[in-house]
Amino acid sequence: MGKKDKQEEIFDAFCLENTVYFTRVPESYKNREIYKPLNEKALKAFIPGIIREMQVKVGDIVQKGDQLMILDAMKMNNVVRTLFSGKIIAVNVKEGDMVKKNQIIVEFE
Amino acid sequence: MQIRLILLPESSLTKNEKKLIMSLKQKSLDLKNRMREALSGGGSKAIEKQKAVGKLTARERIIAILDAKSFHEYDLFVEHAARDFDMDKKYLAGDGVITGTGTVFGHPVCIYAQDFTVAGGSLGYAHAKKITKVMDQAMKMKVPLIGINDSGGARIQEGVNSLAGYGEIFYRNTQASGVIPQISVILGPCAGGAVYSPALTDFVFVVDKISKMFITGPEVIKTVLGEDISMEDLGGARIHAEKTGNAHFYAESEQECFDQIKQLCTYIPWNNLKKADRFPKKPPRTRQYKIDDVMPSDPRQPYDVRDIIKSFADDSEFFEIQKLWAANIVIGFSRLDGQTIGIVGNQPLVLAGVLDVDSSDKAARFIRYCDAFNIPLLTLVDLPGYLPGVDQEHAGVIRHGAKILYAYSEATVPKLTVIMRKAYGGGYIAMCSHHLRADFVFAWPMAEIAVMGPEGAANIIFRNEIKKAADPDKVRQEKMEEYKQKFANPYVAAAYGYVDAVIEPAETRKMLMHALDISSSKSVDVVFKKHGVPPF
């Protein structure tokens, strides 16, 4: 690649420690997942699977560590416990439903 | 193969002699028939199917890689001994794998190729035994092993015996690691446990639309996780070359792949006790690649580090490895003075050349390869440091970054370093500094060797002055300039002896060739240990 070809390319501006560098920034970096702190109002499925047994309903008040449901995944019956205490305002899944990883299954007040 | 008979006039032969000649002829014919059957693989229909998807047959592949007429096949008549599920009634030619020896550019190699036309190249006990036998041979004779993978996976009918087969292969891959070069060529499916043999070897070659590698296939993923993905997007050649880093070489066709394998063979030694072949020394094509043209005057502007390599390497050649993955670091082979060298270079063209999880991983493994096989290392430094970010920290940049430190510190081959521009902070230490026992560290006059970039440093050191100033921006600028003048150069490091010589870029080739020459009998006393515990 000669000098000429280089001038034709438009580079991304990439800032590190207060210095801007002109460089190629790969799509994988641009599209990386931006970190979000844990939302204490929504419990997500930690593994994909099928809901086998629902043990709570809307309006229930639960304590951190309480059992909410059984999630059948990876040939195991996984007990789903709540990470948060509080009143359940929505249960987004029912028995027999297939859930994806990180799908919001229970919402708290 | 022929048995030659001296024919006498029939009338002069006794009855017994006539009988003997007949039986010899018959035996020769019998061998021919047996060979014909075994060489027919899975039969014309299966071969047609293989060709229809653009694949060569296993035997054609071996012949394409090896020197003409050099292939010698063994274990052609090996048959499986499975009894269950009607397997006793099934004849599988060569049990679905071809093994043998041959030469590449006149040097002997051991080779095997799974034959997809025979029971989908599935791995049963006899199949695995053929592979492990040729692996043992490669280890005994200290010659490289080339494995061509094209298999549907374990032969389910053989149950735990096929698992045993895989295990025996993995064990040998590990034992052979660092002793003989191991090359894996993925020319078809390579799924489930089978992927771990290539993963344990030194170099993995993939071909677009032909190679497929994954632990669990799209079907399982769909049933278990509900995620819908094609085989190509899950574990196609491009994915492994670009995203996972499992593949080292990517080709558009099988022929291109074979050419890459042969080219690689010119750079590597045949075992860990040898050195790579020395080639006639050739000057770089400096009219095309001139350091002064490549290097921009503004240190924030990018350039392609590969053009720098080409400006001093023999014949301006650079054989790049893992070109598409973690492109912010460049690794590959070149020659200086006719000798193979392994080059690790920060790539300012991509992400300003930062170190991150993937680039650390990529460089570290290559450094260990070069060290295991007596290939001198050249490190070209121009990086602003490590990539900041939650994703990097959470992906374990500490653990992965440590691999580079470990690999460089452990390496005892000649280690040459050229600091071209920026060498800041942890990145300076990691990129084969004297502190990690580089043998020679050269710096160009525009090098900036410092604890961090001038902008960042000025903000920290002169924080109070800047805060108190009537015009903070002006003071910041002044302080930055002051810092730049004082520290953003190679002379502070040179004053401590951390840089051996500050050289003109145009002198690089001469200095490196001399350094290589001086290092040719380098020996380092290594503390006895079984092995280290690297952060791998």
Image (cartoon, coloured by chain):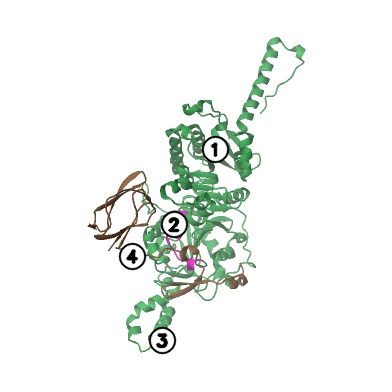
Chain colours: A brown, B green
Which residue is the site of mark 2? B361
Residue depth check, mark 1 versus mark 2: number of the one nearer the observer: 1
Query: Please, what secondary structure does the residue beneath circle 3 have?
Result: helix
Q: Residue at x 43, y 46 (%)?
A: B223
Q: Which residues are magenta?
A: B350-366
Alpha carbon distance from label 2 to label 3? 42 Å
Does B73 sit above or below residue B488? above
- Determine which residue is flagged by label 4: A37
**Looking at the image, can residue B270 be seen?**
no
Q: Is residue A41 left or right of residue B97?
A: left
Marks 2 and 4, Cα distance to the nearest angstrom? 28 Å
Q: CA distance from mark 1 to mark 4?
A: 48 Å
Question: Is B72 colored magenta in this rendering?
Answer: no
Could you tell which of marks 2 and 3 lies nearer the N-terminus?
2
B262 shown above or below A25: above
- Rendered residue at 75%/12% (across/down): B12
Residue under label 1 = B120
Q: Which residue is mark 3?
A: B474
Three-letter amino acid code of the residue under disc 4: Pro
User: Is there a contact, CB below 8 Å, between mark 2 and mark 3?
Assistant: no
Answer yes or no: are tags 2 and 3 on the same subunit.
yes
Where's residue B340, x and y in %? 55, 55
Question: Residue under mark 3: which chain is it in?
Answer: B
